[in-house]
Image: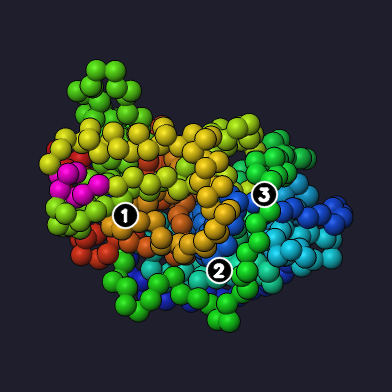
Amino acid sequence: MPAAEVAEPISTAAMKLRTLSKTHVRPRKPVGRRECQLITFDLPYVAFFYNQKLLLYKAASATGDAGFDDAVRRLTEGLEIALEEFHQLAGKLGKDEDGVFKVEYDDEMAGVEVLAAAADDVEVADLVVEEGGSKLKELVPYNGILNVEGLHRPLLAVQITRLRDGIVLGCAFNHAVLDGSSTWHFMSSWAEICRGAQSISVPPFLDRTKARNTRVQLNLSPPGDSTSSNGSDADPPLREKIFKFSESAVDKIKTLLNANPSDGAKPFSTFQSLSTHLWLAVTRARRLKPEDVTVFTVFADCRKRVDPPMPEAYFGNLIQAIFTGTAAGLLAANPPEFSAGLIQKAIEAHDAKAIDARNTEWESNPKIFQFKDAGVNCVAVGSSPRFKVYEVDFGWGGPESVRSGGNNRFDGMVYLYQGKSGGRSIDVEISLEAEAMGRLEKDKEFLMDG
C-alpha cells in the first residue's frame, strides 16, 4: 500500500436529484441596519467565483422523510442563531456614493439561500471516491457564479441533500466577503449551535477597517451572463483527484528534506516540505522544458503578519498570494532543498512591510484578477490542514469527507485539508491537465511508494 492513497472514482453519470424546498434564512433576532466597507484584502476576489465546500456525512438518523426533515430543521434553526453574529453572510454587496464596495445588511433582506434536495439512489461511499465530476457539481449551489453577483444574490447559499445513508452539505460563500479561516470559523460556530450551544463561543471580529482603512473605488458591475464559465472551451481538460498522505508519509517527507541542513539554515516546516514535494512532482508530471518558468503560489493568512496583528476571529479576507518561481531545469538539477529554500524565503519575506507595500501598490492602480492568474505553470496552494474540518459536527458526527466544489479550479490548483485519520495526515486535492495527472498518479516518488 503506497503511503499516499489514491481515491478511485466511480461513474459520474448524472444522479436523480429532486428539489424538495427552497427558502431564505435570516438571523433569528433583529440586527438592524449594518454596513461594512470591503478593504484592499477583499477586493481582488470580486472577480473570482463563489468559494464552494462540500461536507459528506454518513448519518442514517438523518435520512428518510422524518429524519431528513429533522436534520433540515436543526440546520436551519442553528443557522438563524449563527447569523446573529455572522450577519454579514445574510447581507448583499453594495456600493456607496463613491463606488466603494461594502457589505450591506438590514432585517428586511432575503438572507441566506437554503435549498433541500434528495438523491436517494446515491450513497456516501459513492461520493467519497468521486473525483469531482457531475455528481459533486450537482450537490453544491452557485456553480460558475462570480462574486460580483453578490450585488443581487445572497452572499451564502446552502444545499442540503439527502442521500440513501447520509447527507451532503454544500455551501457557496462569496469570496469577496471571507477567506478560508473565516469560512471554517463560521462552519464550526454553526455546528456548535446545532449541537445545543446557546451562543457562539468565539464571536467574529467584524471591523475590517482595523486591518486596512483605504477606500478603493472599483468600476465593476455584474456580468450580463449570470452563469459565467470557470474556463473556456480552448482550455485543456482538467482532472481532479485527492491524494491522501498519512501521518507517517508527511513525517517522512519532512524528515528527508531536513536530513542535510545547511549551516545556519532554518528547518523546513511541514507545509514547506509538502509544498516542495508537490511542486517538484507536478513539474515532473508536466514534462516542462528546462527553460520553462514554473511558479509556486500560496494564499497565506496574514492575520498575524499585519501590524498590528489581527485576531484569529477576524472575519473577512486577510490573505495574500505569495509567489516564487524559477526555471524547471533548476528545480530538476538541484536537490529538493533548493526548491524548499525558495518557498521558505518567499514566505518569510512576506512580513508587515511587504504586505503594506503590496496593498499600497495595488491601491494606486487597482487590478482585478481572474481566479487562474496565479502564475505560469503554477502550483497554487489554498486552504490549510490547520482548519479543523473533520470537527464540524452538527449533531450526527464529523464528516466522512470534505471537498472543494468546481469553482475557482485551474491547472495546478491545490487544496490542502486535514486528513480524516487525524494527526498530521493531510489530504491533497489537485486539479491538473489530464495527461499530467495520469503521470502524477504513477509517480512512485510522489506517492512515497517504497
Mark 2 vs 3, N-terminal side = 2
Tell me the tag on residue 378.
Answer: 1
Helix, strand or loop for disc 3: loop
Q: How far apart are marks 1 and 3 (CA)?
A: 31 Å
Q: Quadrant of the N terminus?
A: top left
Which amino acid, by three-letter code, is at mark 3? Thr
Whether residue 285 sits left or right of residue 90 in the image: it is left
- Mark yes or no: residue 64 visible: no
* Front position in the image: 405 or 266: 266
Helix, strand or loop for disc 1: loop
Task: Decide whether the magenta segment is chiefly helix, strand or loop.
Answer: helix
Quarter location, residue 45? bottom right
Which amino acid, by three-letter code, is at mark 2? Leu
Above or below residue 32? Residue 149 is: below
In the picture of the structure, the residue carrying the numbered disc 2 is 146
In the picture of the structure, the residue carrying the numbered disc 3 is 214
- Mark yes or no: residue 200 visible: yes
**Disc 2 or disc 3, which is closer to the eye?**
3
Mark 1 vs 2, N-terminal side = 2
Which residue is painted at 15% across and 38% down in the image? Answer: 334
Magenta-colored span: 326-332
List x then y, in percent, for residue 120: 51, 69
List x then y, in percent, for residue 297: 38, 48
Mark 2 crowd level (few <14, some 14–19, many ≥20, 10 Å Cα): many
Which residue is painted at 55% across and 41% down in the image? Answer: 356
The extreme bottom residue here reads 224
